[in-house]
């Protein structure tokens, strides 16, 4: 069957969602899924990256219609225009990615440049000589010459570079890394912003965000070049998941960075006291750098923030309270360190605008008009911030397409309106693609006080039981328990059913460790070791699903664990699920095979040479 998603206004202003059966599906629906927007210099044209349709849409703002559709070689992830607007650069994501160059006058693709694994976030240099882009799963940023269309240099960054922007002088490239890159069982666990010096072509520094920061999605440098704004989730992972009120589990944030000092100014929550703003995604500045715009992909909103007022307020915050200083006891934040925990800090500085659309993941600002691209609604929204009352107007990108059950499942996974007060979504701990956030969470399913690392949901329905301790007999059981005990709501059975159906369709992405789609020589040597009795790896991780779905004591019990036996995980897509083991105590697979396996209870590896360890790691990271 097919379903459509409709909303109606209720007393508290939220959308009440309902499923309407509209008939039998005649075939697979084609959705657009806007993930990025770019506005022409004159503001009359919007370019829309339609991710699931593999298309670039050209939208005429005056006529309010799509005037051209360009088929792309792979799903588009990012857009950028040359300064004169003559060329549009489009990153198309695949294991062998492509940078497409399109002439905007004709709408024809002039060049397709081979680039790295899953490219995104293209950023042209001010002089038009170079374009920078992120190779998300190669953990690197690449510079491509726009003269000869060839790579110039690459710079390694911590993990999954997801968004990037240049300072106006073209000197400093700021890069938002989607996930944290270390162990999860240490005191401070947070993702970083990388700074690349484009002159020396080197990593010039890293800015660590507050503890629990992750799932970075948006980053923009202000037009005046003085500040950088980064959107991210700020997880309170060190607390047991007993409630949601006041952001007990997850809060949503922007971190502001001073480009002169190349350090963070502070982190500000974009939630309200009793209303979460889950999954902050795209961010943009007004042309005068006085206003910030942030989309909330989980609560389907746009935040309009008085950036000038916010920066002034942050500058006035003392670092400590000195003797004799007058203290404002009515303020939640008394010193700068209080701000990342203050749900009221933006009161009087921010307006939340309901978009009447679903999944805003992109932004374009044209004067006082703010456009959002809505992933699940397959449309645009526009808000005129010069109007007396700010209301979002829907701009269709084509005929309305009802959501089928798979699309609904993906939507619910990313929807905070099925969560108590909108604090989080399933994606708040598994990212929007149902993988990992790299954090340890103290869930209630196995008691309080024994945190476990987030697991990827890829193949979860085919590899029961669920959870590290196997406390849920199936993934279906886990989905329903998660709605009740993590989102803290009760939903009709159609909601978890749709989620189940979508999760079952997830496919592993080919590993960036493969060479031309095949095992490297080192990985091939590792495969033979893996399958041999010399290591015994295949005994518990047999080829196919690479798990026997049983529990074992492999010597990894920690001081907080109440049991020594853990579920055997699949090794498929292991390359993107670090840190490893049930407690995230191993940063790399090499650590799993060595310092975490001294008694050979996790495969027989103590007798292997360093080269054999590397070969074995190369194989499992290629799965």
Image: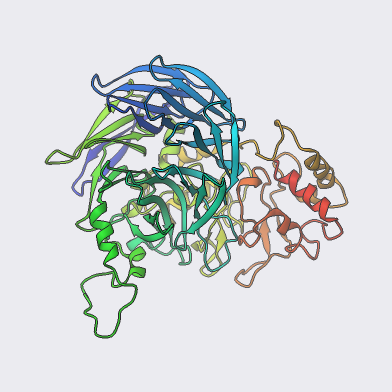
How did the renderer colour the structure?
A: rainbow
Horizontal arrangement in the rendering, residue 264 relative to residue 400 (left or right): right
Q: Position of residue 504 (x, y in %)?
A: 55, 37
Is 590 in front, or is 162? 162
Residue 382 visible (yes or no): yes
Instruction: Determine which quarter of the picture holds residue 322.
Output: bottom left
- The quarter in which the N terminus is drawn is top left
Horizontal arrangement in the rendering, residue 409 relative to residue 285 (left or right): right
Q: Position of residue 236 (x, y in %)?
A: 44, 63
Of all residues, the one furthest to the left in this rendering is: 388
Residue at x 30% of width, y 72% of height = 318
Instruction: Determine which quarter of the picture holds residue 40.
Output: top left
Of all residues, the one furthest to the bottom in this rendering is: 323
- The quarter in which the C terminus is drawn is top right
Compared to 261, does 202 lie above or below? Answer: above
Residue at x 55% of width, y 22% of height = 112
Number of numbered discs visible in the structure rendering: 0
Residue 33 visible (yes or no): no
Is 569 in front, or is 61? 61
Is 187 in front, or is 472? 187
Horizontal arrangement in the rendering, residue 296 relative to residue 109 (left or right): left
Residue at x 56% of width, y 35% of height = 118
Is 585 in front, or is 346? 346
Q: Position of residue 424 (x, y in %)?
A: 39, 52
Q: Position of residue 500 (x, y in %)?
A: 50, 40
């Amino acid at each position: 069957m097919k379903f459509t998603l409709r909303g109606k206004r209720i007393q508290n202003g939220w959308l009440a969602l309902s499923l309407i059966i509209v008939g039998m599906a005649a075939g697979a629906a084609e959705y657009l899924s806007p993930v990025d927007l770019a506005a022409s210099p004159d503001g009359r044209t919007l370019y829309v990256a339609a991710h699931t349709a593999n298309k670039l849409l050209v939208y005429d703002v005056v006529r309010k219609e799509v005037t051209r559709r360009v088929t792309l070689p792979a799903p588009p992830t990012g857009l950028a225009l040359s300064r004169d607007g003559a060329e549009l650069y489009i990153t198309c994501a695949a294991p062998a990615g492509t940078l497409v160059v399109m002439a905007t006058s004709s709408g024809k693709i002039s060049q397709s440049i081979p680039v790295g694994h899953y490219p995104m976030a293209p950023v042209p240099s001010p002089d038009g000589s170079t374009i920078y882009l992120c190779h998300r799963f190669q953990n690197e940023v690449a510079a491509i010459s726009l003269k000869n269309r060839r790579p110039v240099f690459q710079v390694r960054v911590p993990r999954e570079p997801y968004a990037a922007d240049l300072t106006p002088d073209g000197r400093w490239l700021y890069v938002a890394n989607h996930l944290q890159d270390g162990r999860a069982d240490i005191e401070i666990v947070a993702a970083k912003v990388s700074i690349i010096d484009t002159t020396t072509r080197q990593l010039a520094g890293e800015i660590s965000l507050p503890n629990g920061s992750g799932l970075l999605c948006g980053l923009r440098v202000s037009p005046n070049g003085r500040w950088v704004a980064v959107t991210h989730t700020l997880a309170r992972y060190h607390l047991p998941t007993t409630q949601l009120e006041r952001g007990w589990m997850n809060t949503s944030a922007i971190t502001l960075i001073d480009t002169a000092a190349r350090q963070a100014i502070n982190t500000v929550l974009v939630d309200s006291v009793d209303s979460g703003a889950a999954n902050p995604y795209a961010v943009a500045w007004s042309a005068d750098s006085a206003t910030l715009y942030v989309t909330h992909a989980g609560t389907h909103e746009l935040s309009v923030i008085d950036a000038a007022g916010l920066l002034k307020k942050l500058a006035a915050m003392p670092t400590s309270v000195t003797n004799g200083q007058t203290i404002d006891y009515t303020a939640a934040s008394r010193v700068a360190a209080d701000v990342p925990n203050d749900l009221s800090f933006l009161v009087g500085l921010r307006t939340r605008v309901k978009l009447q659309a679903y999944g805003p993941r992109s932004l374009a600002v044209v004067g006082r008009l703010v456009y959002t691209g809505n992933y699940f609604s397959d449309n645009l929204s526009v808000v005129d911030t010069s109007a007396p009352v700010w209301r979002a107007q829907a701009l269709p990108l084509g005929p309305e397409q009802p959501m089928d059950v798979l699309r609904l499942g993906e939507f619910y996974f990313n929807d905070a309106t099925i969560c108590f007060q909108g604090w989080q979504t399933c994606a708040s701990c598994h990212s929007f693609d149902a993988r990992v956030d790299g954090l340890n969470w103290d869930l209630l399913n196995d008691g309080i006080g024994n945190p476990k690392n987030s697991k990827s949901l890829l193949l979860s329905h085919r590899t029961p039981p669920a959870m590290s301790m196997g406390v849920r007999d199936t993934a279906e059981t886990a989905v329903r328990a998660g709605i009740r005990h993590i989102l803290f709501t009760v939903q009709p059975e159609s909601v978890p059913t749709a989620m189940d159906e979508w999760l079952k369709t997830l496919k592993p992405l080919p590993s960036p460790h493969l060479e031309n789609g095949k095992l490297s020589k080192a990985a091939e040597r590792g495969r033979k070791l893996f399958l041999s009795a010399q290591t015994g790896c295949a005994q518990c991780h047999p080829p196919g699903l690479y798990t026997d779905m049983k529990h074992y004591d492999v010597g990894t019990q920690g001081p907080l664990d109440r049991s020594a036996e853990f579920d055997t995980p699949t090794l498929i897509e292991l390359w993107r699920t670090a840190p490893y083991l049930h407690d995230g105590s191993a940063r790399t697979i090499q650590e799993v095979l060595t310092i975490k396996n001294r008694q050979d209870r996790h495969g027989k590896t103590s007798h292997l040479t360093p080269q054999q360890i590397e070969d074995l790691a190369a194989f499992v990271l290629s799965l």
